[in-house]
Amino acid sequence: MSNERRKVQGIIVKGHRVASGMAQNSPYPRGTIEMQTPHFKRLGLDISPFFPGTLNINIRPYQFKVHHPKYTFENLQWNEKSPPETFSFSPCQVIYEDREYTGLVYYPHPETKPDHFQDNSTLEILTPALDSIEYGHLIQLILNPQEIEIFLS
């Protein structure tokens, strides 16, 4: 990350549970993250140290916009069931229960994503597994404002 940092607080919210493979009736029983990991690694980004699912962090009343992320992989065909997608990643820090963890903002571009959309106030984050995390818990993110813009909605 650059020396510039932006801290924002959010709440852990329930996502679609498709990334982790915990959704009932998911077309991806292993989870999308586990399926995508070898493709990202082949392209130069190893996400295997992170939990194979995303933390969904709602930062309302703020919204976010992705600008110039560190990694972008365009038109990635990661499975046979859907068309290629574009993904971006931005390094971040996560502060939970007074501990800081390295993470990545995981951003499947909505214009290429077939379904399971997030709103503009919910960031998906890859982190190591966090003990005792639950929906409704507060969490802080430290983002690079050159890559992820945070603004009032």
Image (spheres, rainbow, N blue to C red):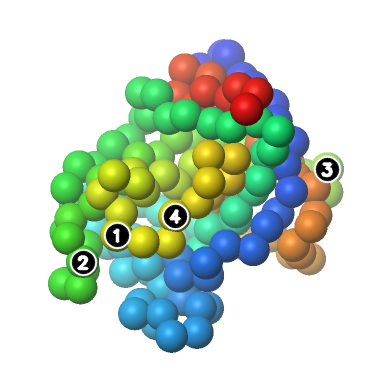
Q: Residues within 10 Å of mark 1 (few under 14, many from 20)?
A: few
Q: CA distance from mark 3 to mark 4?
A: 30 Å
Where is mark 1, residue-wise?
Answer: 114
Describe the element under mark 4 as helix, strand or loop: loop
Q: Quadrant of residue 5?
A: top right
First in sequence: mark 4 or mark 2? 2
Circle 3 SS class: loop
2 and 3 marks in contact (CB < 8 Å) = no
Q: Is residue 103 visible?
A: no
Q: Which residue is mark 4?
A: 117
Type of the residue with mark 3 = Asp
**Does residue 63 sit above or below 26 in this rendering?**
above
- Looking at the picture, how far across and down is residue 152, in whole percent? 65, 23
| Residues at marks 1 and 2 touching, judged by CB atoms closer than 8 Å | yes
The residue to which callout 2 is attached is 82
Quarter placement of the C terminus:
top right
Q: Amino acid at mark 4?
A: Phe
Residue beneath disc 3 = 98
What residue occupies the far front of the structure in this picture? 153
